[in-house]
């Protein structure tokens, strides 16, 4: 079993780094950690970076997860290869460009690019946001899945994800105490379905709602409240159509040993108990 410890980063390819920076700092409210000729590194919490925009095709999207150490990374590579996943070991320069010691890259059954990393760097410097959006940290991602039932088996039986709740066949899965770090949403092709940052309180969600409207940022869902995690949320679109979510109050699973996933119906109220409709975010709902 591959033991995922934490979410480390998201990497997004883009043809327009300047627009990405304007959005990430002026709208989303992240902190620029570093600018390189071909990449922009952004912080949202104690991680040295949690989001990297790099010069590349927008279809190039990668999620990085931390594993315990080199032995765990080697064991993960062997397990994935035994299951016929093509595993690529990152070079020292690529690891340096991710602020990690080492990493491997592979694709999940849908074709999403996943990286497993060791020793992702933290920074003791306090996160100092470019806009006061109230961000307290990078929290979870939604992933496209061409077959959520098949992919749930991969994430739970090959990796150590556990299902906290399901909405229809969408599993909300945890890898630690946080209610979910990964959700799988039906789609025709691989990709990141949304990227979540936690904000401190519901006032931050609502302040951003008015801020985003004033700045003509497309809001795609919310404001609302998820009955699953209990979080109050807002989803909006960034460069290259990537969807970001602010939410507050994603809960923790009280007792890992006894938690049983709840099954929610696949209908709008299961995504928002206040009545916002997920529209284009969830096909057919
Ligand atoms: C996957 C959909 C969009 C969703 O929003 C479902 C629930 C929650 C939650 O319970 O907090 C999410 O934020 C999520 O899955 O990402
Ligand atoms: Fe979410």
Image (tube, rainbow, N blue to C red):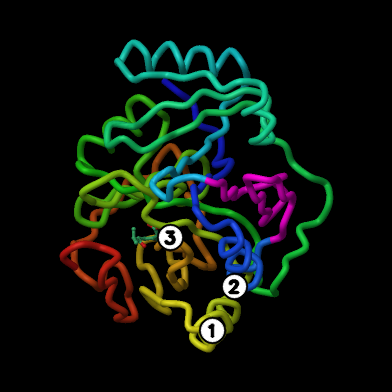
Q: Residues within 10 Å of mark 2 (few under 14, many from 20)?
A: some
Residue identifier under label 3: 240
Relative image position of residue 151 (x, y in whole percent)? 27, 36
Relative image position of residue 196 (x, y in whole percent)? 50, 59
- Label 1, label 3: how many angstroms apart (C-alpha)? 17 Å
| Sequence order check, earlier mark of 1 and 3 | 1
| Sequence order check, earlier mark of 2 and 3 | 2
91 sits left or right of 193 in the view? right
Report the image quarter containing ligand 1: bottom left
- Label 2, label 1: how many angstroms apart (C-alpha)? 8 Å
Q: Residue at x 43, y 60 (%)?
A: 240
Classify 274 as above or below 192: below
Q: Residue at x 60, y 77 (%)?
A: 204
Q: Nearer the viewer, residue 142 or 255?
A: 142
Give the foreground label among 2 and 3.
Answer: 3
| Sequence order check, earlier mark of 2 and 1 | 2
Disc 2 + disc 3, Cβ < 8 Å: no
Residue identifier under label 1: 215
Q: Residues within 10 Å of mark 3 (few under 14, many from 20)?
A: some
Residue identifier under label 2: 27
Indicate the secondary structure of the residue bearing disc 2: helix
Disc 2 + disc 1, Cβ < 8 Å: yes
Which portion, as a residue range, is magenta?
A: 31-55
Q: Residue at x 58, y 28 (%)?
A: 117
Q: Which mark is residue 42?
A: none
């Amino acid at each position: 079993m591959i033991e995922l410890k934490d979410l480390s980063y998201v990497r997004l390819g883009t043809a327009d780094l300047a627009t990405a920076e304007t959005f990430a700092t002026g709208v989303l409210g992240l902190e620029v950690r570093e600018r390189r000729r071909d990449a922009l590194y952004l912080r949202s919490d104690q991680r040295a970076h949690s989001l990297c925009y790099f010069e590349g095709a927008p279809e190039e999207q990668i999620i990085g997860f931390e594993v315990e150490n080199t032995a765990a990374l080697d064991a993960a590579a062997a397990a994935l290869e035994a299951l016929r996943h093509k595993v690529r070991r990152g070079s020292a320069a690529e690891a340096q460009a991710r602020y990690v010691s080492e990493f491997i890259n592979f694709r999940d059954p849908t074709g999403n690019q996943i990286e497993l990393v060791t020793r992702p760097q933290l920074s003791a410097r306090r996160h100092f946001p470019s806009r006061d959006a109230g961000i307290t940290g990078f929290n979870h991602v939604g992933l496209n899945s061409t077959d959520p039932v098949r992919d749930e088996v991969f994430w739970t039986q090959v990796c150590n994800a556990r299902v906290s709740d399901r909405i229809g066949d969408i599993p909300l899965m945890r890898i630690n105490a946080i209610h979910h770090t990964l959700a799988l949403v039906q789609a025709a092709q691989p990709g990141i379905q949304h990227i979540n940052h936690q904000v401190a309180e519901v006032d931050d969600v609502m302040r951003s709602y008015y801020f985003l409207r004033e700045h003509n940022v497309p809001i795609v869902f919310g404001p609302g409240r998820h009955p699953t995690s209990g979080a109050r949320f807002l989803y909006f679109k960034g460069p290259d159509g990537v969807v970001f979510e602010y939410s507050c109050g994603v809960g923790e699973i009280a007792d890992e040993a006894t938690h049983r996933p709840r099954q929610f119906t696949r209908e709008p109220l299961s995504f928002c108990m206040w009545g916002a409709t997920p529209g284009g975010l969830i096909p057919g709902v």
